[in-house]
Image (cartoon, grey):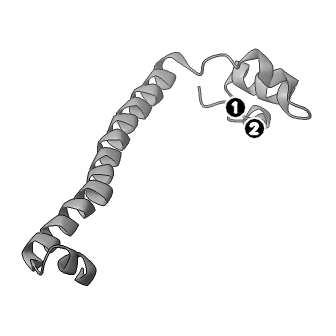
Amino acid sequence: MRLLTRVLGGRETLAASLLTTVWILLVALPLVWLGFNLADHVRDATAFIRDVQVDGLPDAPAWVAGIPFVGERLVGWSATGCWPAARRSAAGCWS
C-alpha cells in the first residue's frame, strides 16, 4: 500500500481503491463463479441420482472388465445392482 501510494503521488484513496478492485478481480469474482458452478453441478448430481433411482445404474463401460483383480466383480455388481455382501444376505438387494 505504501509503495503504491508513493507511486500514485501520495493519493491514498486512489491506492486503496485500486487495491480493492484488484482484490475483487483476483479473489471475489472467482469465488462467486465457483459458487454458481458448484450449484449447477449439484443440480446435475441430483438429476443423476433421481434417474438412477428410477432407471437403475447404467451398464459398466467395457474397459472396466479389464481392470486387474476387481474388473469382473465390478461388472457383475453393475449388472445386478447389488454389492456382493447384499447378495449373500437374507434381505437381498435393495431393489
Residue placed most toward the observer, 9 or 30: 9
Dots 2 and 1: beta carbons under 8 Å?
A: yes
- Label 2: state its secondary structure: loop
Kindly identify the amino acid type of the residue bearing the numbered disc 1.
Gly
Task: From the viewer's perspective, tell me whether residue 78 is left or right of residue 70.
Answer: left
Tally the numbered discs: 2
Task: From the viewer's perspective, tell me whether residue 61 is left or right of residue 44.
Answer: right
Task: From the viewer's perspective, tell me whether residue 8 is left or right of residue 90.
Answer: left
Residue identifier under label 2: 89
Q: Check the picture and name the quadrant holding the C terminus.
A: top right
Q: Check the picture and name the quadrant holding the N terminus.
A: bottom left
Residue name at image x 91 percent, y 32 percent: 68
Q: Residue furthest right?
A: 69
- Label 1: state its secondary structure: loop
- Residue 40 to residue 8: above or below: above
- In x, y percent, where is residue 24? 23, 59
Residue placed most toward the observer, 39 or 56: 39
Q: Residue furthest bottom?
A: 2
**Residue 21, numbered circle:** none
- In x, y percent, where is residue 76? 79, 23
Residue name at image x 75 percent, y 38 percent: 89
Residue identifier under label 1: 92
Residue placed most toward the observer, 95 or 62: 62
Q: State the image quarter where residue 18 is shown.
A: bottom left
Residue name at image x 26 percent, y 57 percent: 28
Kindly identify the amino acid type of the residue bearing the numbered disc 2.
Ser
Residue placed most toward the observer, 25 or 70: 25
- In x, y percent, where is residue 62? 77, 15
User: How far is disc 2 from disc 1 in space, using C-alphas?
Assistant: 5 Å
- In x, y percent, where is residue 13? 8, 75
At label 2, counting other C-alpha atoms closer than 10 Å, the crowd grade (few under 14, some 14-19, many 20 or more) is: few
